[in-house]
Amino acid sequence: MADHKVQHINKELSHINLSEEQSNAAKEILFEFRTQLKEFKKFKDETELKKKDLFLKDYLSIHDIETLDKSVDIMAREIEKNFLTKMHSLLSIDQRISFVKYIDDWEVK
């Protein structure tokens, strides 16, 4: 799914009419974003395993589950903020108007 999402992301940028310079910069931003998404997926999978381990214990700590969930949410938000900040600085106002129409597609889940 992450690879499909990356392919979809690349297609969305084609509608923004990037200059050659912007396109080169966007490729670097997207490469970093894809790398972070792969790391996120691995982290999220590991966190899910930890949650399963917690569930199998004699006592289930809600605090421990919340801590795991928060760690996933924090990582997702950081990746998203990093990406959106870089794209914002790269795009003109008109390009941002086009980009924002699909901003939900960039949400890290």
Image (cartoon, grey):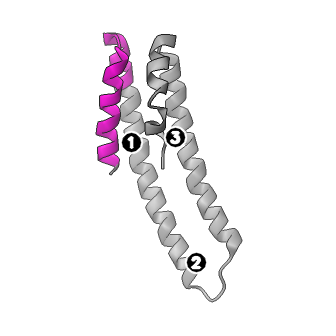
**Occupied quadrant, residue 36:** top left
Asked if residue 32 shows in the view, the reply is yes
Kindly report the distance in space between the C-alpha atoms of the residues bearing marks 3 and 1: 10 Å
Kindly report the distance in space between the C-alpha atoms of the residues bearing marks 2 and 3: 27 Å
The answer to whether the residue labelled 2 contacts the one labelled 3, judged by CB atoms less than 8 Å apart, is no
Residue farthest toward the right in the current orientation of the protein: 63
Q: Which residue is mark 3?
A: 79
Residue 55 falls left or right of residue 95? right
Picture residue at 49% right of the left edge, 18% below the top: 97
Return the disc, 1 or 2, that comes first in the chain's sequence: 1
Position of residue 42 measured from the top left corner of the image (x, y, whole percent): 42, 57
The answer to whether residue 52 is above or below residue 75 is below
**Occupied quadrant, residue 61:** bottom right
Helix, strand or loop for the magenta stretch, by majority? helix
Magenta region? 2-26
Residue nearest the observer in this picture, 89 or 109:
109
User: Badge 3: how crowded within 10 Å, few (<14), some, or many (20+)?
Assistant: some
Q: Which residue is mark 2?
A: 54
The answer to whether residue 40 is above or below residue 12 is below
Tell me the SS state at disc 3.
helix
The answer to whether residue 61 is above or below residue 15 is below
Q: Please tell me the numbered disc located at residue 35.
A: 1
Tell me the SS state at disc 2.
helix
Position of residue 51 measured from the top left corner of the image (x, y, whole percent): 54, 72
Position of residue 18 measured from the top left corner of the image (x, y, whole percent): 35, 14
